[in-house]
Image (cartoon, rainbow, N blue to C red):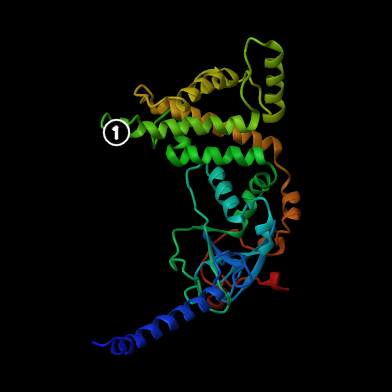
Amino acid sequence: MTETKQEELLEPIYKEIQQHRQERNLWLQKHPTDTPNAFSNIAIVEGILLSNTVGFRKGDLVPLMSIGDETILTWTHERNEYSVVIAKVDPDVKNNEYWLTFGYLFELAHALSTDFEYKVECAYKWVYSFDKNKSIKEQDYGEQDENFGTATINSLRDLLKILPIINLLYSDQKFLTAVQNLDIAYENHRFCHICAFQKEGSKSHPNHEPKNWEHVGFLPKLDVGILFATRAIEALIGKPPNRQNQNSLLRFKKKWKDDLGMEPDGIFEMVNKSFLDYYYDLFSLRNSSAHSFGEIPFALTRITAIHAQAFSWKITRNYFEKHKSPLDEAIAKFEVNTKLIYSEPTDYSTRLTAESREDLMKPDEGWRG
């Protein structure tokens, strides 16, 4: 085969490759990945579904609140399907030192409010050229997976319940760091809080020690639980001082009482020791976990990690109760659409949109005015 003949045969292939490159470049121009941007500044917040009890209709896109560079809205994408949460984001957020998203704040606040019994993951799925009148399946997600993961179903009023937690997470870096560390502890080692704090009687979840064939596999989880539970407390009140230095000890006790609203010499009933004494023990245990130098802590028990995480949870909750702002302040700060939320009935919940509710469940849509 001559070189000329070979070039003639290959020419259609070259043209097809060139056309594909041009189409790909054009597609990339309309789907830049540095979201948010001019083509995509709207994301569906995965993991959160909202009931339609208040009277949403297909195509509704209703402002819910504002937080930082995000406007949070509800979007009813289909008749008789739960509404989703939308984040409309100012592209200038990329100029900030960091970006604390609504989704992540909801994730942490929801976890803390449920005593880490349930974890929802709120990823952002970016939509290109969003059209509220198209179905959720018809939206353009670029190269992202078009499927959605599991989600928790919420009423609008559920958001108000955790709004004070969101507010403190947003405004107090010590609290944010504490809850982040506590979240990692529970992500690695879960147990039932209700049963752990129950003093007497039969327990639905006894939080048994692992079986002998499970023990070695449990040890890294217990180690992480202890380490990050201690880091959570350290973020809030710091490292305990040398007990021999009375002045430092007295200052630390005062800081404990002022910052946590609890007596350091009060009893942590799980171990029948004072909170302060247990914190010293916990710090010693944490040092062993952090500096094991490759040695496997075969003697470590699950109850030890449960005590550490439960203690850290109690300290974190006390810090929140001491430092939280009134709900009205958080509502004003985040410009919450209370006209919408307070219109939501409290005696039932439904996924049915207003078009399908012409009976006794017909909603009062006065919030639209």
Tell me: 190 left or right of 282.
left
Rendered location of residue 114, percent (x, y): 53, 44
Rendered location of residue 251, percent (x, y): 72, 19
Rendered location of residue 89, percent (x, y): 65, 63
Tell me: 216 left or right of 31.
left
* Residue type at the position of mark 1: Glu
Closest to the observer: 235 or 63? 235
Relative to 33, residue 279 above or below: above
Outermost residue on the left side: it is 1
Tell me: 74 left or right of 255.
left
Crowding near the residue tagged with mark 1, few <14, some 14–19, many ≥20 C-alpha atoms within 10 Å: few
Closest to the observer: 72 or 337? 72
Residue drawn at the location 57% of the way across and 17% of the way down: 277
User: According to the image, label 1 marks what residue?
Assistant: 214
The reply to whether residue 196 is visible in this rendering is: yes
Relative to 200, residue 249 above or below: above
Numbered circles on residues, count: 1
Rendered location of residue 355, percent (x, y): 56, 78
Q: Quadrant of the C terminus?
A: bottom right
Residue drawn at the location 56% of the way across and 73% of the way down: 128
* Quadrant position of residue 264: top right
Residue drawn at the location 31% of the way across and 31% of the way down: 216
SS under mark 1: loop
